[in-house]
Image: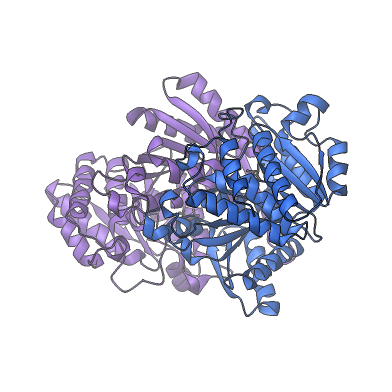
Chain colours: A blue, B purple
Amino acid sequence: RKIAFLPGDGVGPEVSAAARRVLDAVAETHSLSLKYNEYLFGGAAIDTAGDPLPSETKTGCLEADAVFLGAVGGPKWDGGALRPEKGLLDLRKALGVYANLRPTSIAAGMEHLSPLKIERAKDVDFLIVRELTGGMYFGDRTEGNDTARDECLYTREEVSRVARIAFEAARKRKGKVASVDKANVLATSRLWRNAVNDLHQAEFQDVEFSHVLVDAMAMKLIQAPADFDVILTENLFGDILSDEASVLSGSIGLAPSASLGDGARGLFEPIHGSAPDIAGHGKANPVGAILSAAMMLRYSLDAGEAADAIENAVAGALEQGRGTSDIGGEDTTASFTEAIMALIE
Amino acid sequence: RKIAFLPGDGVGPEVSAAARRVLDAVAETHSLSLKYNEYLFGGAAIDTAGDPLPSETKTGCLEADAVFLGAVGGPKWDGGALRPEKGLLDLRKALGVYANLRPTSIAAGMEHLSPLKIERAKDVDFLIVRELTGGMYFGDRTEGNDTARDECLYTREEVSRVARIAFEAARKRKGKVASVDKANVLATSRLWRNAVNDLHQAEFQDVEFSHVLVDAMAMKLIQAPADFDVILTENLFGDILSDEASVLSGSIGLAPSASLGDGARGLFEPIHGSAPDIAGHGKANPVGAILSAAMMLRYSLDAGEAADAIENAVAGALEQGRGTSDIGGEDTTASFTEAIMALIE
Ligand SMILES: CC(C)[C@H](C(=O)O)[C@@H](O)C(=O)O
Ligand SMILES: CC(C)[C@H](C(=O)O)[C@@H](O)C(=O)O
């Protein structure tokens, strides 16, 4: 099983290293053979190769069974002609990973970590399915100092294929999908709503289904997060809502993501960014990266039991009160990682 | 002082009537003469006049000193060729109200109403300044069943004029502005960032200033809402972030807004929508509308003391534990309104 390994920028290398230690631990307990090929990516690749996604990196990712990414970006490259983030968008597109899965849950007994009052934090367990290769992120743009323009485009096919992933995920969960758009204003949202409706009618009538406007969803995630199961939305809304959602469990540092396309190959990355302010201090929360590694085992490497083992170990370490400072703990990245590794059976 | 009065749809008429009772009460205590002209608007205007913004309504608004609006929209008009929301967008554009002010605060002692843990809800007091007449809301669109397109356009001038309002507001508050964009992806956000930077450098160096990415802001509003003073952003991001912010104080039903342009004339509306599920039941929270009426007195009708009187009365009623069910109270719209009126001196 070949993993293209992209540590990236800022805290990326630190959390990637932590995830790799945990992967090596489960590889041993679960007799998996994992082979890593490390590539330059993001700002680090701009500095060395003048390109945030060098062709060697791209080819390596396309030839791998899964791609693991730490984080990209940082103030060093802000305002430059080459942007690390451009490399990430190009990589997502090249891999064809149009569905970004971002789970949020608060385990029973862990409600004290949430910024929400205990009653509201109870029973939170939802999955955001974010469209990842369309919309404003990939539309035509006009850069300009006096006028600028971004275009948002969606095709019915782009909407249907990601909606299918959401409905199928709901069938394996609590059987509910809420589709988010701004259909009272945007043409792309009206297409979105029609396409999702049609797919629901044709193939997924067993799934409970509703539409929620994006502004209303931004409220409901705070007011009644336990009401949701699968939340389906387009690229830009998904960026905003999944970051909002990620802190409900205590810290964005805990949140993993998987990006999938039509085959098994996926891209796995924590939701947090490169966090330049804490990079190099050994205090980044490794859990987002470690849980992304678990998602990689489950979705791309056909190793669901090893994924379960990692997730249980993370839950166990949190229950023991272990954690980095972002969740009020006293661990370093390394000691938190070791606490998790110690719980891998 | 002429007020164009647009009750609109759903709970709009109920909360508008409540605001008007309170306005009449302060008009008496503060010797103001307020003249109301009521107009059809939104879905109600589609039903009667076949147009969400009939020309009589538009003319009446343009001739008034201030426009007061309840709410627009509802399932009855969803999917129709004429949309109530289109009337609202056209009205904002016609009035030239490019700056939408949405304050959020949690009074000391009222932290229990917030969905956030008490510590996080302390000292929250910020103002979102949302650009209101540009961006994706007003770009060119292609409606379509197989492909759809929305365009987002900004000019430097559109950004500068709303940024000026934010910087000036900050000078009268805590002296801080956070400007929100998605400059790591969007061309319009890079223009936004440059234009706001330039204005800050040229005229507002005394104001503490930072840039925050929209996804990060969606988190920070939950994690550290007390860190912010003035939050400046474009139209669509402002729609999402201000709804998110509105529930921090307990309910979107509490949140007012003022939309201003270059002159004194403004548009005043609660942030909540038409809430069709509770319309006609007499249980809508009137506070968003009542505080919008206070903003109208302050910004358009040169009656700051009357505005203060309303705001103090609302704070007093909340302190007494009065409130509708959305904030855990037992009042109806009418009894809550009367409790507020009783506190107007
Ligand atoms: C780095 C940035 C381009 C990226 C995005 O907006 O998609 C990030 O915020 C994310 O959510 O993965
Ligand atoms: C009704 C709708 C068009 C409107 C908007 O999106 O601006 C509303 O959500 C608001 O925030 O005032």
Quarter of the image holding residue B45? bottom left
Q: Is residue A235 left or right of residue A314?
A: right
Up/down of B135 relative to B195, above or below: below
User: Residue A192: horizontal and vertical position, in percent?
Assistant: 66, 63
Question: Is A4 displayed left or right of B27 in the figure?
Answer: right
- Which residue occupies the foreground of this view, B12 or B267? B12
Q: Can residue B2 be seen from the camera position used here?
A: no
Residues B121 and A185: in front is B121
Whether A183 is drawn above or below A324: the answer is: below
Position in image of residue A140 (x %, y %): 75, 45
**Image coordinates for residue B36, horizontal then vertical, percent:** 28, 57
Q: Residue at x 62, y 33 (%)?
A: B191
- State whether residue A244 is above or below residue B41: above
Q: Is residue B303 toward the left or the right of residue A148 in the image?
A: left
Q: Residue at x 40, y 72 (%)?
A: B277
Is B288 left, or right, of A77 in this rendering? left
Instruction: Give percent across and percent down for residue A258.
Output: 69, 53
